[in-house]
Amino acid sequence: MFNQLNRGLSNFFKKITIKEFSPKSFRKLTIKLNDILVQNDVAVKTAKAICKKLEEKLIHTEHARFSSLKPLIISNLRDVLLEVMAPPENIDILRLVEEKKSKNKPLVIMFIGINGVGKTLTIGKIGKFLQDHNYSSVFAASDTFRAGSIQQLQKHGEKLGIRVIAQEYGSDAAAVAFDAINHAESKKIDVVLIDTAGRIETNVNLMAELEKLKRVAEPDLIVFVGDALTGNSLVSQATLFHEKIGIDASILNKMDADVSGGAAVSITNITQKPILFIGTGQKYKDIQSFHPEKIIDQILSKK
């Protein structure tokens, strides 16, 4: 992962030629850094924030004369990246499940995002994750628009032994979610995972449908699912869904194939919401809890 960004930063550090420890020198340094970040799909706003924070840290860092600046810059950049990628508040899904169980209610999670990003498979992965932690779930097939979406979710349900609540194509998506929640409450199922349509992120009808679904289902979490390979488009999608619907967290798929890393660096900073998991393959086990430290280690490794 992130070979391209890693390589760009490696070359950047090799070419550091700061001769004086001054704001002017740091500014020249961060101009070059900003270009590398933007070239690797880091959002412009996030790249500027990283560079500004780095300049401020370096200005206030004590520096022994004639000592090497490279370790100092790497150390400060690591701290800055952690600040940028760490959300204001973390979300622990398993803790939330327990809190809802204590009230005899299911945890309701609504997944949103455009078609083709692996939203339905992600729901399967989360269902398996919950099973592995001894929690039950039910799937709500509330994507009643895309051809084959219901069957796709049902296949995941069959493989995992998880019930899928569905109606006909063209049915009211909110009604499907409502049925799934009632089913979970009556059967004492721990979590409801709601699939949704994702025609085009700017589609007015889609947003109206999602807003209605949100009102009816009253989800405890709204999770944006995105494809890390789409770079800045991913950030634009997340921003728009957050503005129109409101998101609580993100899941990034295809992280194993992401050579730039810009999406992972940007999305928390832009939305101010945490990344819960990263998808790294097509199997149910190919999902990992997100840890910013591990991503930063890969970005800054072998410098």
Image (cartoon, grey):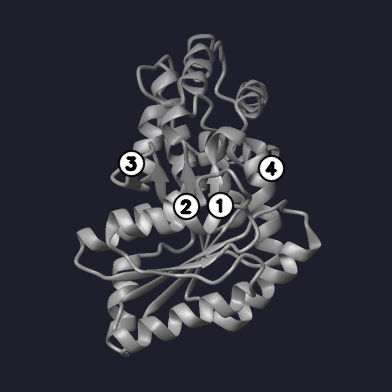
Mark 3 or mark 2, whichever is nearer to me: 2
Query: Which numbered marker is on residue 283?
Result: 3
Task: Give me the C-alpha separation between circle 3 and circle 1.
Answer: 20 Å
Count neighbours of disc 3 (C-alpha within 10 A) and say few if under 14, some if 14 to 19, many if 20 or more: few
Q: In front here: 283 or 98?
A: 283
Amino acid residing under circle 2: Gln
Secondary structure found at label 4: helix
| Extreme residue toward the right, this view | 204
Mark 4 or mark 3, whichever is nearer to me: 3
Q: From the image, tell me which residue sits under label 1.
A: 148
Mark positioned earlier in the residue sequence (4 or 3): 4
Task: Give me the C-alpha separation between circle 4 and circle 3.
Answer: 34 Å
Q: Residue at x 40, y 36 (%)?
A: 295
Task: Give me the C-alpha separation between circle 3 and circle 2.
Answer: 14 Å
Mark 3 or mark 1, whichever is nearer to me: 1
Q: In front here: 8 or 69?
A: 8
Residue 87 in the figure: left or right of residue 22: left
Secondary structure found at label 3: loop
| Up/down of 15 relative to 133, above or below | above
- Expressed as whole percent of the image width and height from the top left, the position of residue 64 reads 40, 24
Q: From the image, tell me which residue sits under label 2.
A: 152
Q: From the image, tell me which residue sits under label 4.
A: 45
Labelled pair 3, 2 in contact (Cβ < 8 Å): no
Q: In front here: 41 or 158?
A: 158
| Up/down of 21 relative to 62, above or below | above
- Expressed as whole percent of the image width and height from the top left, the position of residue 191 reads 36, 73
Amino acid residing under circle 1: Gly
Q: Residue at x 58, y 80 (%)?
A: 175
